[in-house]
């Protein structure tokens, strides 16, 4: 156990701090919800040039080409978070598609797509879930039949965030209808401007259209635009989902949220008494603080395992379940401490923090469901972490 | 930056675990509980062979001079095997008191004996750690103690007691001292000995060579981390037993571990308990390396493991169905160990209040 960073890493931290001191004032303050704005594209370019974004992506594909070093990545994330600065662009193109392409794409695909994606010039959306295929994703029904050199796609996707703003989609379709469900799927990439695609915004309980439905009617895609080969889509998708689950349940987000609640409870009053002086709310705060600390240290433990190339096993499998639930509980405490003020929303008078606690409370529920529901996570934990048996197949009906 | 155990620590954990698996079997634990053995001698001697009683005592006094994280690994193993032996008071809290506030003569007289297992020390600080009940509290005047101390840890086998008075002063009292009455308390957990000391003008040596207030704080912090680690070990054994049972027990023509209702209970237990391990590691590390964080982290580890430990104890019992409720299966020894851990050295509500005070969020 040694929580100090070696001189090499301290020097790297100093470098990052110097960069922030020099350029922090140029950082864009607000994330674009869908397409990055011009100032964000400029910021991304600056970060890429200095190795603070696309750090470990090979140079030939437009990245910075640094050796993967988990500690350095963490130092960058920590210092940017401490300075309140946005790190590089994220989103499904950069966080999920690029790693998948690096692992399984052809040389031509890597050359063509990775660099413009990293720069924020090409925005991607993910076409996985369908109305009838959520937790049982492999049952997906969107069909792609062969016609000459093309696939012709018909079907529907749902929960497609950023589809309305995306240039491209990476999409799971059924190309081999006669094969068992896991073996009949292919991973296609195509333009969202292809004729026959209709995007309808899907308004959620938050009142915002954070997702879309995407309809395909005779959408023609050249057969060459497949990643990982015909019938290999399920394998390719699992490589991508691994990257997604790494994004969800981040304990540092919970740490930031806890600090905001401490500030809120020190500032807001009820009957003239600060909320922090209310023993019931304070006790809930302390309970959640212990959970945040436990998850943060748990994150350090996983980080150490990763730097040693060890699989942390069960310890890794619980992060999405616990992290998303913890964020949800933090939002719940903020709302309860604010009481009636906590239910104000939209543009109401007396609104606190732009109504973001209610928004987070609802959106977090979406995250508990999305990316593999809490129940699917519990199946994974029990089957892969505790070696319990899978559910037996039911008799055919 | 490395957040994890060293190779030496893993080896130690393995060897203590393997030893306890052999010597502290369920049959042996049951025998010790039935006979109210305060210190199961065969288990105690196996631990002496491994240097456990002296692990935190400096080498000059015959110990191993290890850190609290090492002790936390032992506490976890003892909890896992519900070992009926002294540890938290005798091997952790009392040595910290003697090393922090004892005179050279006091250290010379007791540390080597505690290290080689010849003597056992109990600790009487419950009134300071968990609050006074039943008129508990000890006053010190003119080298004599009066009053009573409840929930004394590692009680029955103790040769000496480290006693905190009402002002936070520490005293060393011999178990044979005149005017001292020992009353055994029976808790749900028959694997550990807890008792009451009644003082009638009892002669005591003050521990006043160092900073006694700080020594008391350090004892309490270390003790809380140990209790948390005990719960971690006991909790994981309950999960392992629940998973094994669920993979064996058949109903409706299939093992119950293939039902999602049962699998999800097991997954929830593991997901709730496992991050507590990192919190304990950090708290133990902070005790030695980050003193300004030590009390807060010890409090959080204690309170958090109390909460998730309770959840695991009841849920693992439920996974076992009716068998979990029987004496025959013996699962209750772990359930009760976790139950005592929760209240020892301060229940979670009290400990969280202390954590609030430490951060300036509440008045003392």
Image (cartoon, rainbow, N blue to C red):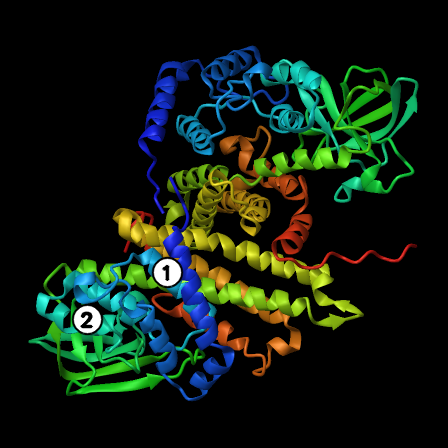
Mark 2 packing: few (<14 Cα in 10 Å), some, or many (20+)? many
Q: Residue at x 73, y 62 (%)?
A: B259
Left-right relation of B70 to A389: left
Residue B26 sits above or below residue A393 on the image: below
Helix, strand or loop at label 2? It is helix
Q: Nearer the viewer, residue B16 or B254?
A: B16
Q: Which residue is mark 2?
A: B112
Residue B231 spot, x, y in % from top left: 45, 65
Against A10, residue B32 (above or below) is: below
- Which chain does the numbered disc 1 sit on? B
Residue B362 can be seen, yes or no: no
> The disc numbered 2 marks a residue on which chain?
B
Q: Is residue B96 left or right of residue A351?
A: left
**Horizontal side of residue A246 vs A20, given as left or right:** right
Q: Hey, which quadrant is residue B224 in on the image?
A: bottom left
User: Where A61 falls versus A373 (above or below)?
Assistant: above
Q: Quadrant of residue B198?
A: bottom left
Which residue is identified by label 1?
A: B72
Q: Are marks 1 and 2 in contact (CB under 8 Å)?
A: no
Q: Quadrant of residue A386?
A: bottom right
Tell me how far mark 1 sits from mark 2, CA to CA.
21 Å
- Image position, residue B364 (x, y; %): 27, 56
């Amino acid at each position: 156990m040694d929580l100090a960073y070696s001189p090499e890493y301290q020097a790297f931290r100093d470098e990052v701090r110097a960069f922030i001191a020099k350029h922090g004032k140029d950082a864009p303050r607000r994330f674009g919800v869908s397409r990055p704005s011009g100032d964000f594209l400029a910021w991304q370019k600056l970060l890429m040039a200095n190795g603070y974004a696309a750090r470990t992506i090979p140079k030939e594909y437009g990245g910075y080409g640094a050796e993967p070093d988990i500690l350095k990545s963490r130092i960058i994330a920590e210092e940017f978070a401490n300075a309140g600065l946005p790190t590089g662009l994220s989103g499904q193109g950069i966080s999920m598609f690029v790693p998948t392409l690096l692992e399984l794409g052809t040389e031509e695909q890597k050359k063509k797509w990775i660099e413009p994606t990293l720069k924020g010039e090409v925005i991607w959306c993910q076409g996985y879930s369908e109305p009838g295929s959520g937790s049982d994703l492999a049952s997906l029904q969107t069909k792609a039949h062969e016609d000459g050199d093309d696939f012709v796609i018909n079907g529907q996707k749902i929960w497609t965030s950023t589809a309305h703003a995306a240039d491209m989609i990476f999409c799971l379709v059924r190309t081999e209808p006669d094969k068992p469900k896991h073996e009949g799927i292919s991973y296609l990439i195509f333009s969202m401007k292809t004729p026959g695609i209709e995007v309808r915004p899907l308004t959620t309980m938050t009142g915002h259209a954070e997702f879309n439905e995407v309809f395909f009617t005779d959408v023609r895609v050249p057969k060459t635009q497949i990643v990982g080969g015909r019938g290999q889509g399920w394998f390719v998708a699992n490589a991508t989902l691994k990257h997604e689950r790494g994004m969800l349940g981040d304990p540092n987000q919970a740490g930031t949220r806890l600090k905001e609640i401490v500030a809120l409870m020190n500032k807001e009053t009820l009957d003239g008494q600060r909320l922090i002086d209310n023993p019931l709310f304070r006790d809930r705060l302390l309970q959640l603080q212990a959970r945040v600390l436990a998850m943060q240290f748990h994150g350090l433990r996983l980080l150490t395992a990763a730097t040693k190339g060890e699989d942390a096993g069960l310890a890794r499998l619980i992060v999405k379940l616990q992290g998303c639930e913890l964020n949800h509980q933090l939002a719940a405490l903020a709302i309860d401490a604010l009481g009636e003020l906590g239910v104000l929303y939209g543009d109401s008078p007396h609104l606190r923090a732009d109504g973001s606690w209610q928004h987070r409370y609802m959106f977090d529920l979406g995250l508990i469901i999305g990316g593999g529901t809490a129940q699917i996570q519990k199946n994974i934990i029990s089957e892969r972490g505790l070696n319990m048996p899978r559910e037996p197949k039911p008799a055919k009906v | 930056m490395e957040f994890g155990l060293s190779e030496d620590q893993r080896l130690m954990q393995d060897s203590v675990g393997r030893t306890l698996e052999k010597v502290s079997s369920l049959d042996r634990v049951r025998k010790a509980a039935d006979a109210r053995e305060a210190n199961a001698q065969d288990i105690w001697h196996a631990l002496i062979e491994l240097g456990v009683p002296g692990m935190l005592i400096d080498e000059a006094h015959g110990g191993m001079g290890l850190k609290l994280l090492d002790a936390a690994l032992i506490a976890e193993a003892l909890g896992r095997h519900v070992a009926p032996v002294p540890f938290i008071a005798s091997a952790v809290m009392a040595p910290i008191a003697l090393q922090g506030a004892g005179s050279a003569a006091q250290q010379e007289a007791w540390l080597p004996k505690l290290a080689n297992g010849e003597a056992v020390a109990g600790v009487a600080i419950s009134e300071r750690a968990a609050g006074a009940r039943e008129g508990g509290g000890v006053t010190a005047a003119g080298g004599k103690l009066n009053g009573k101390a409840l929930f004394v840890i590692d009680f029955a086998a103790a040769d000496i007691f480290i006693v905190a008075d009402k002002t936070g002063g520490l005293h060393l009292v011999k178990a044979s001292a005149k005017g001292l009455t020992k009353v055994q308390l029976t808790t749900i957990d028959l694997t550990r000995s807890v008792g009451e000391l009644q003082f009638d003008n009892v002669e005591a040596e003050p521990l006043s060579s160092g900073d006694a207030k700080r020594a008391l704080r350090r004892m309490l912090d270390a003790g809380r981390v140990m209790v948390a680690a005990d719960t971690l070990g006991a909790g994981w054994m309950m999960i392992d037993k629940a998973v094994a049972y669920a993979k064996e027990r058949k109903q409706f023509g299939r093992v119950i571990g293939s039902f999602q209702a049962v699998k999800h209970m097991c997954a929830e237990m593991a997901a709730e308990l496992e991050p507590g391990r990192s919190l304990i590691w950090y708290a133990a590390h902070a005790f030695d390396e980050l003193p300004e964080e030590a009390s807060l982290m010890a409090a959080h580890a204690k309170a958090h493991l109390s909460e998730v430990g309770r959840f695991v104890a009841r849920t693992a019992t439920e996974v076992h169905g009716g068998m979990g409720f029987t004496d025959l299966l013996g699962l209750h020894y772990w359930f009760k160990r976790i139950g005592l851990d929760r209240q020892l050295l301060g229940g979670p509500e009290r400990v969280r209040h202390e954590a609030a005070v430490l951060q300036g969020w509440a008045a003392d």
